[in-house]
Amino acid sequence: MEALIGIICYTDSIRSNIVRQVSKRGIELNVLAMSGWYF
């Protein structure tokens, strides 16, 4: 993967799920939970 820098989501539970899915595929990617951000 060359074009994606990271993923930001709204809750820690969603972050945990995304981290699990990313790790399962062997991808290094920053995943942050930012509940104060408006998307």
Image (cartoon, rainbow, N blue to C red):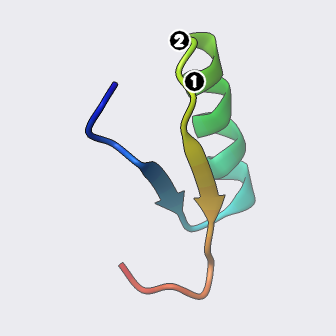
The type of residue carrying mark 2 is Arg
Task: Please tell me which residue is depicted at 54% across the width and 37% down the height of the picture.
Answer: 29
Label pair 1/2, CB-CB below 8 angstroms: yes
From the image, which quarter does the N terminus lie in? top left
Q: Determine the image quadrant of residue 33.
A: bottom right
Check the image and report above or below for 28 versus 24: below
Q: Determine the image quadrant of residue 16.
A: top right
Disc 1 element: helix
Q: Residues within 10 Å of mark 2 (few under 14, many from 20)?
A: few
Separation (CA) of disc 1 from disc 2: 7 Å
Q: Residues within 10 Å of mark 1 (few under 14, many from 20)?
A: few
List x then y, in percent, for residue 8.
Answer: 50, 61
Task: Please tell me which residue is depicted at 26% across the width and 39% down the height of the picture.
Answer: 3
* Number of marks present in the image shown: 2
Q: Which residue is mark 2?
A: 25
Check the image and report above or below for 23 versus 36: above
List x then y, in percent, for residue 36.
Answer: 60, 88
Task: Please tell me which residue is depicted at 52% across the width and 61% down the height of the picture.
Answer: 9
Looking at the image, residue 1 sits to the left or right of residue 32; the answer is left
Task: Please tell me which residue is depicted at 46% across the width and 50% down the height of the picture.
Answer: 6
Q: Which residue is mark 1?
A: 21
From the image, which quarter does the C terminus lie in? bottom left
List x then y, in percent, for residue 12.
Answer: 73, 58
Q: Which mark is residue 36?
A: none
Check the image and report above or below for 26 versus 2: above
In the image as oriented, which residue stretches furthest toward the left? 3
Q: Nearer the viewer, residue 20 or 3?
A: 3
The type of residue carrying mark 1 is Gln
